[in-house]
Image (cartoon, rainbow, N blue to C red):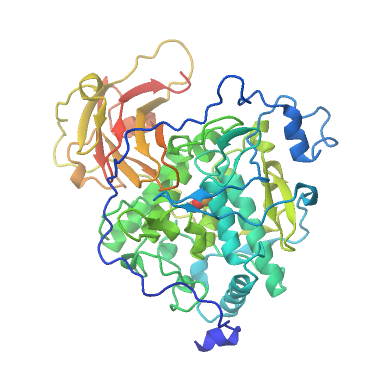
Amino acid sequence: MASLSAVGYATNYIPCSTSFFPKKPPQFNNRRRNPVVKFTCKAKNGETSPGKFDRRDVLLGLGGLYGTSLAANPMALANPVLPDYKNCIDATQPNETSINCCPPPVDPSRVKDFVPSATTVNTRKPAHSFEVGSDYYKKYTSAIIKMKNLSPSDPRNFRQQANVHCANCDGGYTQLGNPKLFSVHNSWLFFPWHRWYLYFFEKICQNLIDDDTFTLPFWNWDAPEGMQIPSIYNSELTSPLYDCFRNPDHLPPTVTNLDWSYGDKPVDPNIQIENNLSIMHTQMITQSKTPFDFFGKAYRAGDDTPTIGIAGQIEQTPHNHVHSWTGTISDQTNPIDLGALYSSARDPVFYAHHSNVDRMWTIWLNKLGGSNFTDRDWLFTNFIFYNEEAKPVRVSTKDCLDTTKLGYKYEDVPIPWLDVSAKPKPRAKAKTLPSAPGPAQVFPITLDKPINVIVKRPKKSGTGSSEEILVIEGIEYDERNYVKFNVYINEDDVNACRPNNTEFLGSFSNLPHGHQMIANTSKTFRISQVLEELGARDYDKVLVTLIPKSNPVKINGIKIEFENS
Ligand code: C2O
């Protein structure tokens, strides 16, 4: 406690109830109370319908922001999805209790447009480089204590900041001009929205401790030294950086599992580190060739709430798994803090987790040859946040692309996964793939046990991309549930196959979030390079194995097609 009193530990702040710890390993919520219910927010005839709403509403909503800087009205053809911040509604927890996580209401006439133009650039550093009790720790804890002690109605209050995340991810807003829910997850909005969110959180910290050089740290889970909950977040129960809703089996020194499934037991730390490095390489390089791969697919005005099939590679893995690995399930149905979207920003480590997610964006652009979208519906999506003076400001994706203009960069630490790619599983003798039925015999199926399917490869004809894409289609699941399954290719013994084997393609996962909604989505993997590495270039068929790791999902088919076909 000594170090805490040194930074002015406030007595009216209670970190969280320390009496709670899950007693049993989490069970799956195998809830099928209701038959499949489609989420029906489609406009009926005669109602305002997506794509048809009056574009002038959007322009008014934007406050004339773009009138001057661009020759033509950029909105004329654009169709960005915009949240209706005027009408925040109750969000929904995965167990369907509604939760009011609306930040203080925004008065549109008070919203000012904000374009950052920082003159100094601070460096965000790895969280593991800081020690409990260090000057940095004192500053950081002091900022968070002050945030937690602000009036509950102050939008900069820590809980209100967590609410901002909850409202934007669990149905607190509809889209401007149509009744569909707005969401910042599972699409190309994921990276820009979270970048802005952290930007204002960091500004508020700077303001509260009157130090504009303060930066959030990043949880460097992609390097061995950073692959555990950083010690500054785990010092003692009364620390403002501590959160009690973390999985007690995953406290330091347990090595983070970047493709964790509920029920997985910790493995030898060195093996876990090797697995993690391969997973990073696969997600950042092998599977992230285009902006759609990396950021996620388009989400425009009038689109249904995006599902995980639309999400970018990094959002799916490792982002989702670091959430579920760190958080808990309070009972059989209710994941909390990092384990579910509505509650995750209540855990201070969330901001370090997302700082590293944000760092992946800079690495993809600067070291891996990636590029941002030029699509205006991405560039001109705008969001409202409360700034460090508790005033509402409107910001736009196009203005967050250069972090130095936002006043920060990331420390240039080693990136050990750059050249640690997955390798084919070593075998004593040539493998003989088991025979298995084709998709027509297997699907549709409820994935409640492992399945093997033999999938035909398409024949190349004409020009165009020859990159082959494995498509798992018609994946149906309840969005309130934790959902995961793993996917292998040409593997005869999945139990002996690790994530650093080429045969492990990756996983499909859903972080529980509100609203009973049956998602129907697909999951794709790039497989040309994989088949090449497995020496299977000339095979006309491949074996695909799906291993369920959660509540069963329904799957309607698997095929291989050429990219963009
Ligand atoms: Cu908005 Cu990691 O979630």
Instruction: Relative to 129, say whether 169 is above or below.
Output: above
382 or 91: nearer the eye?
A: 91
Residue 310 horizontal/vertical position (percent): 48, 35
Residue 562 horizontal/vertical position (percent): 42, 21
Left or right of 273: which side holds 435? left
213 or 550: nearer the eye?
A: 550
Instruction: Relative to 246, say whether 164 is above or below.
Output: above
Residue 59 horizontal/vertical position (percent): 76, 34
Q: Residue at x 26, y 60 (%)?
A: 25
Q: In the rendered image, which quarter is residue 287 located in? A: top left
522 or 337: nearer the eye?
A: 337
* Image quarter (top left, top right, bottom left or bottom right) of the C terminus: top left
Does residue 161 show up? yes
Instruction: Relative to 120, say whether 302 is above or below.
Output: above
Pick out the residue farthest to the front: 46
Q: Residue at x 44, y 39 (%)?
A: 308
Pick out the residue farthest to the top: 462
Left or right of 215: which side holds 477? left
